[in-house]
Image (spheres, helix red, strand yellow):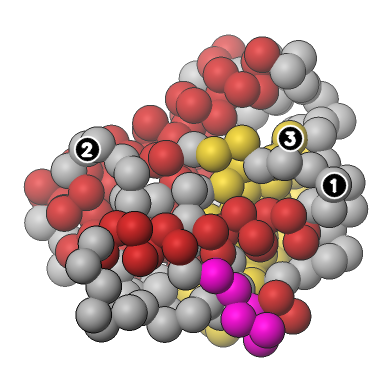
Amino acid sequence: MEIVFVRHGNAEPRDPNAKDFVADELARQLTEKGRSQVPRNLGKFDLVFSSPAMRAKETAKIAAPGMDPTIINALSTHLWEGDWESVDNLFVNQGNRSLVEAYSIASEKEMEAVRAISMEAFEAIKKCVRENGLGVGSRILMAGHAMHLQALAEEFDAMYAHHPEEWDGWDATQGLNWSTPIREVILSEGGSFRAIAPCQSYEFHGLRQINLW
């Protein structure tokens, strides 16, 4: 199974006069530049996921034409019912730095919130994959937001490494082996990375910084 993570492209600015911050955040669309940043050579997918933000949904539809993305609220904090304030405090407006930097100053409360939102997204995605009968050879796309994607990738890594039975068809007895490099990634607008199991293959595109080994 292959999972491709894609950060949304450049989006319209926030409306400083918006009366409803969440509604404004959800409605922000890709700019022309943002649409051009989205990769169009990722191939076909069996299932596509997106955060509820319009810019992420547009990114998903460009990267996977003809597919309607399944919305996962926990792929962002916009409609998530958990401790979104802690996640926002750590991640929002920090899209151009790595998890290493973010986590180095994070409080335990913030880390607990990040783990909670990542696990909720993981469980929702796993449920959809099973309901659609996907397994070995399947391809999944996730469109979302900068460090949310890296945090989710770490959750996948941890679950597959220690509980390979959690996902039928994924041979993860040795884990994905990417926790350190994924923490060092700075994902640019429209940037993407993917993991392929069980062959332990990784590819990174559109990154401003990466130190694999």
State the mark number for residue 66. 1
**Coordinates of residue 110 in the picture (x, y in percent):** 16, 52
The boundaries of the magenta stretch are 29-34
Residue at (38, 31) in percent of width and height: 120
Q: Earlier in the sequence, mark 1 or mark 2?
A: 1
Q: Earlier in the sequence, mark 1 or mark 3?
A: 3
Residue at (39, 51) in percent of width and height: 76
- The residue singled out by tag 3 in the image is 47
Judge whether 157 appears above or below 210 on screen.
above
Judge whether 45 appears above or below 101 on screen.
above
* Tag nearer the camera, 1 or 3: 1
Q: Find numbered disc 1 in the image and state the secondary structure of the residue it sits on.
A: loop
Judge whether 25 appears above or below 119 on screen.
below
Crowdedness near tag 1: few (<14), some (14–19) or many (≥20) residues, C-alpha within 10 Å: few
Where on the picture, by quarter, is residue 23?
Answer: bottom left
- The residue singled out by tag 2 in the image is 82
**Coordinates of residue 181 in the picture (x, y in percent):** 52, 63
Residue type at numbered disc 2? Gly
* Tag nearer the camera, 1 or 2: 1
| Viewer can see residue 182 | no
Tally the marks: 3
